Amino acid sequence: MLVRRIAYAAAETRSDERASIVLREVGGHAVSKSTVARVAHQVGTELAALRQAPAPPAPGAAEPAAETALAGSPGGPALAPELAVVECDGGRLRTREPGNGRGVHGAAWRETKNACLLKMTHRVFAEDPHPELPRAFCDPQHVAELAEMAAPPAAALAPPPETPPPDEEPPAEDPPDEEWRPRRQVRTCLSSMARSSAFGEQMEREARRRRFFEAPFRAFVGDGLPWNWSIWKTRFREFVPILDFIHVLGYLYAAAVAMHAAFPAAWAAYLELARDCWQGRVGEVLVRLRAWLAEQGVDEQTELAEKDPRKPVADALRYLGNNRKRMDYPRYRRLGLPVTSALMESLVKQINYRVKGTEMFWNDPAGAEAILQLRAAALCEDGRLETYLRTRPGCPYVRRSTYAQAA
């Protein structure tokens, strides 16, 4: 029971020290932060080992014990989902070299691999259920935040008049989410320090545990990172590949600001480019970006300096050109598929909450891998951490061998 409480406190609080305080003040357990770190590393290492278990047998066959522990229920998922969605993205944390005594030695930033596998509601439409650009993507301040750029001038943020001019139609209201956007029902999560090829194997095993390959509708959503699409190509070719539309907006907004000195003109250009992409006219956007660069004496093969003011336009042209086959958004909406990786972005923030922060370093690679596995298991919505801790092998009265501290 105490190991269970320590594991949950370590997974859900900001640090081992905070977990120790919560255990003492809320649970009445005098547990040092070093003990929290040891138990978190121990359980996380065990979960990492289970990740390497073979893929589950065909439906109806008996599942190995390891698979049962990870599946979250004794028999795994009873039915394949109607819509199965796989999303992945990278994160960052800081590591240190172990075995060098106290303090931080060999500090470095390392990339984490993260994925969420989603069972979602589903509905197919005869026509595009939302052909107009959503209002959220027509808000200058919100779009600037999505693009991670400076806020636009205050004048651009003034609220629109209550009544549109007589010769204009009011903007279309966004339909309620349940009318066209698929909604999350069950999420499971993965996070690891593994290379993309090994992480792709983890993702495929998790998808097979949840019978995602049997779903009648399947989607794989990601941004433009090459390793995302390498995993799709080698592991998820049966899934519809979709480029996250929010990343597209970021590139388009930066390009529009680079193309026009005055913000009103830049904003008008962004809206045209964004609507064209949303409505499936990616080819027209590429022509427009290419023509602007040609006017500036730049062709597609030119490598521009990082501070060159034309670079955002060249970057947008390259990004959209490389991902054009994954940008048929009207078709995806008709099929009832998601067009953004917002749920993945949210998951990365939830994982970063535990592993990324000031003065937070993890032993490379074992300490970092252990805490990622523990945090991901806690964020799964199928009860897998509870199931594992309840069925974890070993006698509670025999002290286990001590592991090196994770952080």
Image: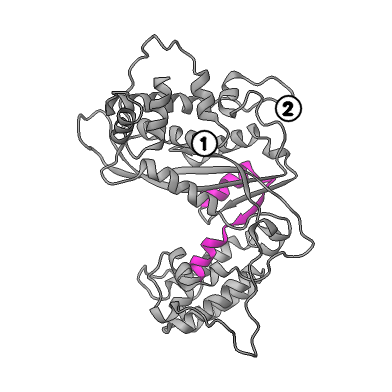
Q: Which residues are magenta?
A: 226-252
Q: Residues within 10 Å of mark 2 (few under 14, many from 20)?
A: some
Regarding residue 296, the answer to whether it shows in the image is no
Q: Are marks 2 and 1 in contact (CB under 8 Å)?
A: no
The quarter of the picture where the N terminus appears is top left
Can you give x and y, in whole percent of width and height, for residue 6 in the image? 38, 26
The answer to which image quadrant residue 406 occupies is top left
| Residue 238 included in the magenta stretch of the image | yes
In what element is the residue under mark 1?
helix
Can you give x and y, in whole percent of width and height, for residue 204 in the image? 60, 37
Q: Residues within 10 Å of mark 1 (few under 14, many from 20)?
A: few
Q: Vertical placement of 39 versus 297: above or below?
A: above
Q: Amino acid at mark 2?
A: Pro
Mark 2–mark 1 Cα distance, whole angstroms, equals 25 Å
Q: Identify the mark at residue 243; answer none if there is no mark.
A: none
Residue at x 36% of width, y 24% of height = 39
Q: Which residue is outermost to the right?
A: 126
In what element is the residue under mark 2?
loop
Residue at x 23% of width, y 37% of height = 105
Q: Earlier in the sequence, mark 2 or mark 1?
A: 2
Q: Which residue is mark 2?
A: 59
Can you give x and y, in whole percent of width and height, for residue 142 in the image? 47, 67
Q: Main secondary structure of the magenta part?
A: helix
Q: Is residue 128 left or right of residue 256?
A: right
Q: Amino acid at mark 1?
A: Ala
Regarding residue 319, the answer to whether it shows in the image is yes
Can you give x and y, in whole percent of width and height, for residue 90 in the image? 46, 48
Residue at x 55% of width, y 31% of height = 383
Q: Identify the mark at residue 198; answer none if there is no mark.
A: 1
Q: Is residue 92 left or right of residue 180?
A: left
Residue at x 33% of width, y 33% of height = 22
Q: Vertical placement of 112 versus 42: above or below?
A: below
